[in-house]
Amino acid sequence: MHYLFSVDPQAFLDLLLGEGQVRYLAHLPEKLEGDRAIVDTLLDTEIIEDGSFLLVHLESETRYGSEMGERLLEYNQKVRKKYKYKRDVLSGVFHLRNDTELKSSPLVQGTSLRQWSRTLEFRYPVVEMQCLAPRDIRQRGRLALLPLLPLTEGGAGWDVVQGMLHDLEFEDHELLKIAFGMAMRCVSEEHREPLKKEYHVIYDELRADPLFREMLNDERKEGRQEGAIQTAQEIAICLVASRFPELEKFARIIIAAVSDVERLQMLIIELSIASSEDHAKQLLFSLASDG
């Protein structure tokens, strides 16, 4: 999702907020100063109606999280603090899985005192991919949104998946790889083998290079060592969250302390082929010991 956000941020802003609301201006650093927290994506935008500026913080959630509202609020406040409370900030989330829907906005906090029952009200937009139909994505005409098709209602159908991959076949290769990975997670068992055979080259690439190793190497070549470290940390944490959700909190603590890109890249590969939760836990313990 981090890569998709970077390819066409305007497409995701429009999907989250509606077309004609804000105009994308620039990407901002995802790392929050003086903190280990890293947001998925932070965008500088302009509100079309009045020309004022707005920071839009995007998160993607792979599974139901009962504390998603609290997380968004925490990140929102940290972004505000980083910019010295001089910028308006809007936080939103894309929920990718077809499990329980995220708690809808607003997040309300308060006390048992009647007159103070609502001490805080925090509103945030949510895109539930399972509530969209393939046509909702296709009619927008944005290539960066196509890899999300398998996540929509009916989007894992064989015809939809084939059409998506054929449309991306001669476009951005990373988009094609992401779309294939999304399809492999979502299609029925009977269609997985045909999918592997039809796109065997991509399947082999994903097995050998599970999550954007080429992108990390490019970042290092361009001298963006810190960016490469942050990206590798995010990828490793997301990989744990998707494969072994019970280990996510532990993984965040361990991985955030590692600043060796080569070690993080190796961890990504090891986690992608880990056979069990215990195996993944051993890898994380080993990483902590190395540190």
Image (tube, rainbow, N blue to C red):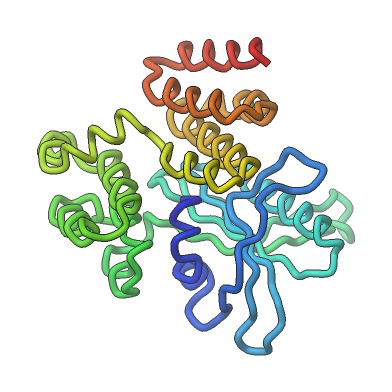
Q: Residue at x 71, y 77 (%)?
A: 53
Left or right of 110: which side holds 102?
left
Residue at image position (21%, 54%) is 165
Picture quarter with the C terminus: top right
To which quarter of the image does residue 184 belong?
A: top left
Residue under the image location 63 percent in, 89 percent down: 49
Single out the residue that lies furthest toward the bottom: 50
The residue sitting at 37% across, 62% down in the picture is 144
**Residue 203 relative to residue 10: left or right:** left
Q: Is residue 74 above or below residue 208?
A: below
- Judge left or right: residue 238 versus residue 76: left
18 sits to left or right of 250 = left
Where residue 64 sits: x, y (%)? 50, 42
Residue 105 seen in render:
no
Above or below 291: residue 210: below
- Residue in the foreground of this view, choosing between 45 and 149: 45
- Residue 217 appearing in the image: yes
Q: Nearer the viewer, residue 84 or 99?
A: 84
Count every numbered label the image shows and give the total. 0
